[in-house]
Image: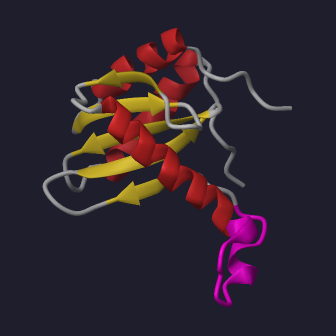
Amino acid sequence: MQPEPLSRELAARIASAVRHVEGVRSVVLCGPEGQPLAAVDEPDAARSAALASFVALRAEALPTDGDLRGMGRQLAGSRFLHAAISGGPREALLLPLQGAYLFITHAPGRAAAISAALQPIVRRFGATSPARS
């Protein structure tokens, strides 16, 4: 059973809470088609949302229909849990979240600390992310 998609109100509350995590510079929550649901401190939310959904949809497709070039045993049965984008003066995290995508830009080197800080925020708002096995 699929979880209910995030409402714009819940997305805005999550984005605001995530923005307060140390090292986070901007937050965008978007739907699977790239439509922005909420944004905090992101000057071009539509562009970030489109990038987030493009990367996430490709990451989700890789284990099922991507060109695995001999890595089939390693990726069989896998699922998209997160992606990290690095380079330049800021980095980004991309995570699936209850039928949406959470796109966070942050200071370099903060990905692990931010990822750890997200779990209580997700639980507090009752949003769901894919379970880790």
Would you say 73 lies left or right of 44 here? right
Say if residue 111 shows up in the picture: yes
Q: Quadrant of the N terminus?
A: top right
Q: Residue at x 68, y 57 (%)?
A: 79
Toward the viewer: 79 or 38?
38
Task: Point out residue 59 in the picture as x, y percentages from the top left corner.
Answer: 58, 60
Toward the viewer: 77 or 32?
32
Q: Residue at x 25, y 44 (%)?
A: 106
Residue 8: say if magenta. no
Q: Residue at x 50, y 9 (%)?
A: 9
Image height check: is 109 above or below 43? below
Q: Quadrant of the C terminus?
A: bottom right
Image height check: is 61 above or below 100? below
Q: In the figure, residue 28 lies in which quadrant?
A: top left
Image height check: is 23 above or below 73? above
Task: Point out residue 72 in the picture as x, y percentages from the top left corner.
Answer: 73, 81
Q: Say how the picture is coloured.
A: secondary structure
Toward the viewer: 32 or 92?
32
Task: Point out residue 78 in the picture as x, y percentages from the top left corner.
Answer: 71, 63
Residue 71: say if magenta. yes
Would you say 51 lies left or right of 44 here? right
> What segment is highlighted magenta in the picture?
63-78
